[in-house]
Amino acid sequence: MTDNNQGCKITLYWLEQSRSHRILWLLEELELKYELKTFKRGADKLAPAALKEVHPLGKSPVITIEAPGAAKPLVLAESGAIVEYLVDHFSSARPSLVPQRYTPGSEGKVGGETEEWMRYRYFMHYTEGSLMPYLVMTLVNDCKLLMSTDGYRTELTSTAIRNAPPFFVRPITTIVASQVENQFLTRNVEGNLAFLEDQLRTSPGGGDFICGKELTAADVLLSFPVIAVTMRVLKDKKNKDRFPLLVAYAKRLEEFDGYKRAVKKVEEIEGKFSASM
């Protein structure tokens, strides 16, 4: 029997309602053996201090890899870096998670890359660099993302900004919150959803995934924000009608056996699982 772990002991430090679940899914897709250590957020919604014992920033996801003969465990943080390291070293069970890089006869040439691989490289950075910052801001501001009555504009209500200060300065913070919503968050959240819808529409080879016909590690990275945003923004009919491919894509990701196994594993330990932010 093939040892996909190559003798390594892998531990995932998983935090509820965080980006760590996609790492758990990737471990399942790669058919790796691992230890799962779960953590709960405090009343302040922040990660517990215990995570700082694993990595100085105290964030999740973090994985440790104890390789045979190594003097100390390898500690990896940041979702993109973790995903890239895992598929670089442990993808023998699922080589299709990384698209073929070059077209035949163009190996090593500038511009010789396949469209699937170029998308893969882009979305490995897009998810955390472009999409997640706006979604995190809506969470921090306690924004409710709702499609307006005309069906063409996303309305964000920053209740946290409006209601936090003393009543006598609320008119000022209300104005500030409205400006943040209308000129920044609304435009960028809506723009990213439309962009993803278009990318799915033009997927190479008419594929069902962001890079083409096969699930890739880029899809795994996208899974957390896409599934979370469909739960918060695209759950009613008028929103689903505007972004049908994105809604279908989220459901498709949730139907993978590896994703379901990851959910079941968390449920067995924690008693429940939530994909929301």
Image: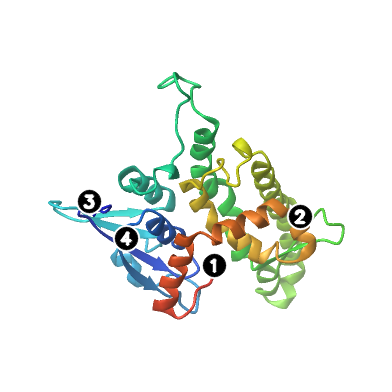
The three-letter code of the residue at mark 2 reads Asn
Identify the residue position indicated by label 3 in the image.
6
How far apart in space, not on screen, are marks 2 and 1 (Cα)?
27 Å
Q: Does label 3 or label 4 sit earlier along the sequence?
A: 3
Q: Earlier in the sequence, mark 3 or mark 2?
A: 3
Position above or below: 256 against 211: below
At x 72%, y 57%, the residue is 181
The amino acid sitting under disc 3 is: Gln
Q: Which residue is mark 2?
A: 182
Residue furthest front as drawn? 1
Report, in whole angstroms, how far the alpha carbon at label 3 lies from the one at label 4: 24 Å
* In contact (CB < 8 Å): disc 4 and disc 1: no
Q: In the figure, residue 145 lies in which quadrant?
A: bottom right
Quarter of the C terminus within the rendering: bottom right
Quarter of the picture holding the N terminus: bottom left
Residue with the mark numbered 1: 275
**Label located before the other in sequence (2 or 1):** 2
Q: Residue at x 60, y 65 (%)?
A: 139
Calculate the distance from the C-alpha at mark 3 to the C-alpha at mark 2: 51 Å
Residue nearest the viewer, comparing 150 with 35: 35
Q: Please name which of the two marks, 3 or 4, marks the residue nearer to the observer.
A: 3
Relative to residue 28, is residue 215 depicted above or below? Answer: above
Q: Answer yes or no: do the residues labelled 3 and 2 have beta carbons within 8 Å?
A: no
Nearest the camera: 39 or 32?
Answer: 32
Q: Badges 2 and 1: C-beta atoms under 8 Å apart?
A: no
- The one nearer the camera, 159 or 168, is 159
Q: Is residue 135 visible?
A: no
Report, in whole angstroms, how far the alpha carbon at label 4 lies from the one at label 1: 24 Å
Q: Which residue is mark 4?
A: 55
